[in-house]
Image (tube, grey):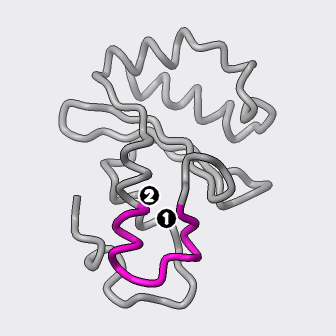
């Protein structure tokens, strides 16, 4: 991953989290919850691994809210936490995960953006 200082060359007062999310790996599919734009879903590729991240500043996946990051070490810690909470596996493993999981039981299934994300992720993993 690129150094966090390259992602945010000047520490702004309010931080757009998209560059941080996008710096975790090559983004193959990304969807943002329209109801709460601080929440979303990402499918990454990082060389031979693929990753699935659910992020939300008000969920257990993000223990350090972005808006509380006051310096580069805190931003770096947040990005590391996000990467560690990404489900990583081979293309086959993630394909099996997306195709066999009962998504209707997932809280996010109520959002059309999530359902569209799941379908796009399945296609990206073919």
Nearer to the camera, 62 or 103: 62
Which residues lie in the magenta part? 64-78
Q: CA distance from mark 1 to mark 2?
A: 5 Å
Main SS of the magenta part reads helix
Which image quarter: residue 125? top left
Q: Position of residue 105 (x, y in %)?
A: 74, 19
State left or right for residue 85 relative to residue 106.
left
* Residue for point 49% across, 43% down: 42
* Residue for point 74% across, 54% down: 34
Neighbour tally class for label 1: few under 14, some 14-19, many 20 plus, Cα within 10 Å = few
Q: Secondary structure at mark 2?
A: helix
Which image quarter: residue 63? bottom right
Quadrant that contains the N terminus: bottom left
State left or right for residue 82 relative to residue 39.
left
Q: Is 49 included in the stretch rendered in magenta? A: no
* Residue for point 42% across, 17% down: 95
Circle number at residue 18 = 1
Outermost residue on the left side: it is: 47
- Vertical order, 7 against 10 (above or below): above
Quadrant that contains the C terminus: top left
> What is the total number of numbered labels drawn onto the structure image?
2
Report the residue marked by disc 2. Answer: 21
Q: Is 68 included in the stretch rendered in magenta? A: yes
The answer to whether mark 1 and mark 2 are in CB contact below 8 A is yes
State left or right for residue 119 relative to residue 28.
right
Q: Position of residue 81 (x, y in %)?
A: 41, 53
Q: Position of residue 91 (x, y in %)?
A: 31, 22
Neighbour tally class for label 2: few under 14, some 14-19, many 20 plus, Cα within 10 Å = some
- Vertical order, 46 against 121 (above or below): below
Circle number at residue 36 = none
């Amino acid at each position: 991953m690129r150094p966090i200082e390259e992602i945010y060359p000047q520490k702004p007062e309010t931080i757009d989290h998209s560059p941080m999310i996008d710096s975790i790996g090559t983004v193959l599919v990304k969807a943002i919850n329209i109801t709460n734009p601080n929440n979303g879903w990402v499918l990454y590729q990082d060389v031979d691994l693929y990753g699935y991240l659910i992020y939300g500043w008000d969920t257990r996946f993000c223990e350090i809210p972005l808006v509380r990051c006051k310096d580069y070490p805190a931003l770096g810690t947040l990005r590391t936490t996000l990467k560690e909470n990404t489900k990583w596996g081979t293309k086959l493993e993630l394909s099996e995960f997306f195709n066999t999981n009962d998504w209707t039981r997932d809280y996010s299934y109520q959002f059309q953006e999530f359902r569209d994300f799941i379908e796009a992720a399945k296609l990206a993993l073919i």
